Amino acid sequence: MAFVQIRAAREGDCGDILRLIRELAEFEKLSDQVKISEEVLRADGFGENPFYHCFVAEIIPAPGERQGPCIVGYGLYYFIYSTWKGRNIYLEDIYVMPEYRGTTGQELRPRSRDWFQNNQKGG
């Protein structure tokens, strides 16, 4: 049985993140609005002072399964500052591919929250 892993996005994940951004835009009937590229995602999220942070949901196949790991979801967030409340985190997008939203999607919600609480930088 495959395992769902929630982890911090890596620079090499930008192609998959862009694929998922495009899927979300298509679902929202806003495909023409996506202007970002893989290179921009890489530069903006993985430099010395990243503009955003991201986590991914990755399916890790069981031993003996043919397919390799597959990124099936992402959450993209960044830090903001409120003059009334102080530090805040803005979750820009959270998306899981439709075919993984059932049981896997239900599993991702609490695990994403736990990962997020344990791995936030600066908040």
Image (cartoon, rainbow, N blue to C red):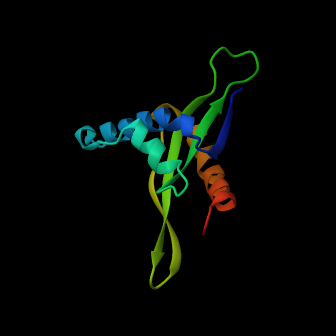
Task: Identify the residue at horizontal 61%, vertical 67% (top origin).
Answer: 122
Q: Farthest front residue?
A: 48
Residue lying at the far bottom of the rendered structure: 84
Inspect this view and state whether residue 58 appears: yes
In the picture, the quarter occupied by the N terminus is top right
Residue 48, position as x, y percentages in the image:
55, 54
Asked whether the viewer can see residue 101, the reply is no
* Towards the viewer: 77 or 94: 77
Residue 93: % across, % down: 44, 51
Q: Is residue 31 left or right of residue 106?
A: left
Q: Position of residue 79 (x, y in %)?
A: 50, 65
Q: Position of residue 18 (x, y in %)?
A: 42, 37
Q: Nearer the viewer, residue 121 or 39?
A: 39
Q: Quadrant of the C terminus?
A: bottom right
Q: Nearer the viewer, residue 102 or 19?
A: 19
Q: Tell me the quarter of the picture where residue 3 sits.
A: top right
Q: Looking at the image, which residue sits at the far left?
A: 32
Q: Does residue 46 sit above or below 102 in this rendering?
A: below
Residue displayed at 25% across by 44% down: 33
Residue at 46 percent of width and 45 percent of height: 43
**How many numbered marks, from 0 up?**
0
Query: Which residue sits at x=52%, y=80%?
Result: 86
| Horizontal side of residue 18 vs 87, given as left or right | left
